[in-house]
Amino acid sequence: MRRDKWHRYAHIPTPLYLLALICGLPWIKGSGDPKWIWVHLLLLGAITNLIFVWSSHFTSTMLRLPPESDRRRYLVRVLLLNLGVISVIVGKIQGLKTLMAFGATAVIISSGLHVRSIQIQIKKALPTRFKKIPHFYIVSALFLILGGLFGGFLSQGPKGEFKYRLLLAHYSTNIFGWIGITVAGTLITFIPTMLRTQLPAKAENHGYRSLPWLIVSVLAVDTGALINIRVIALIGIIAYLGSWIYLLSPHFRFVLQRNSPFSFISTVSSLIWLVISLTSLGIDIAKNDKWKLVSSHAESLIYILGIGFALQMGLGALSYLIPAVLGGGPSNARQNGDVSERLKATRLILHNVGLGLLATNYSRALFLAGGAMVALSIILNLFLLGSLRPARSI
């Protein structure tokens, strides 16, 4: 199967989850736990599927292996992943703890298969310059396994303050570990790729050195929450933020570049929301002596982390990557690139201003207006991505 055709099929789950989220909003709003449902549709459904696609693609690219070498294994693990996602969501809606536990187990197994597949590819590959980058994807998938275990325990209804400590560890592991470390490894080379410029001299060195600190930071947040020592969790948040700053520092000069593409501006915006979230969470951990309050405030940051960081990062990346993989020669690539840049300012304003209204939650009317703006941004992005022209068959 040609690369462009493969990617058109492989990306189907992500827009389906996003459309389910948008079209189901009235029903989700009236459900017993609406925030839980939309978070899992977005992060576990749409974003995790997107990460599975692109971490597999980048692994093959960085290791200079043919994409076909991983496709059969990919189909197995992505089918298992989505069986797990659907089982978790249906189990939550119907109050079926056994089904939720089954879903969490399926997600964990699919993550393990993802790790194993990347390890197989690394062993097959000859020495290449960027052979260390797939290690970010292995580590992040291991965090998804850990996050799945935490989620499985949460689905069984733990009681007391331990529930809130486990919930914070679950958030930290899945967002900062699974999503965050995946993004961190990708951005080492992806930022200059988006801007069609050279990789900064220290980018690789800073990137590779940051990985152990990112790992230790997430584990510190988890450990501090689970053993009830807030200062450890706070140190973890500070170290995680510092690791990101160190990783990105060689790329800071690109921020001042004029006429940047939508993909880069969207990436910068998503990273700003990540910094805001980490700062806010650190302040909450420092000033509150009750984990229930910390967990509640962390839950309120889900809008920022889910929509501002993870989703905006994904939509920005797709606006560059999809035209690139569709191919079709310079003319077709240029035309697709122009399409992906349409309504650039409109999409960015709708997404970020809408998120600001959601995050402040000042009034019901503004909250609904923010939700409508974000939904419209998602629809515009999906429409433009769907409008891209595939390479013509010969």
Image (cartoon, grey):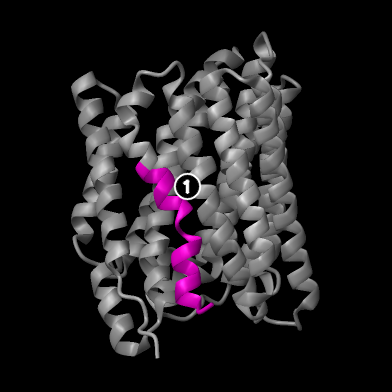
Q: Position of residue 225 (x, y in %)?
A: 68, 25
**Quarter of the figure with the C terminus:** bottom left
Q: Quadrant of residue 149?
A: top right
**Which x, y percent locates residue 269?**
36, 51
Q: Which residues are magenta?
A: 1-19
Three-letter code, disc 1: Ala
The answer to which quarter of the image holds residue 82 is: top right
Q: Is residue 122 above or below residue 316?
A: below
Residue 252 placement, left or right of 131: left
Residue 88 appears in the rendering: yes
At 56% from the left and 48% from the top, the residue drawn is: 179
**Is 327 situated above or below 154?**
below
Quadrant for residue 59, please give it. Answer: bottom right
Q: Nearer the viewer, residue 4 or 123?
A: 4
Q: Is residue 259 visible?
A: no
Task: Establish if 367 lies above or below 129.
Answer: above
Along the horizontal axis of the image, is 175 left or right of 109?
A: left
Residue most toward the top? 160
Image position of 61 with respect to 7: above or below: below
Nearer the observer, 17 or 205: 17
Circle 1 sits in a helix, a strand or a loop, which is it? Answer: helix
Q: Quadrant of the N terminus?
A: bottom right
Type of secondary structure dominating the magenta stretch: helix
Residue found 50% across the figure and 79% down from its top: 2
Please report the residue visible at 61 percent of the width from the left and 76 percent of the height from the top. Answer: 67
The answer to whether residue 11 is magenta is: yes
Residue 150 covered by magenta stretch = no
Using the image as rendered, state which of residue 53 and residue 62 is in the foreground.
Answer: 53
Q: On the picture, is 367 further left or further right than 125?
A: left
From the image, tell me which residue sits under label 1.
46
Q: Residue at x 33, y 81 (%)?
A: 333
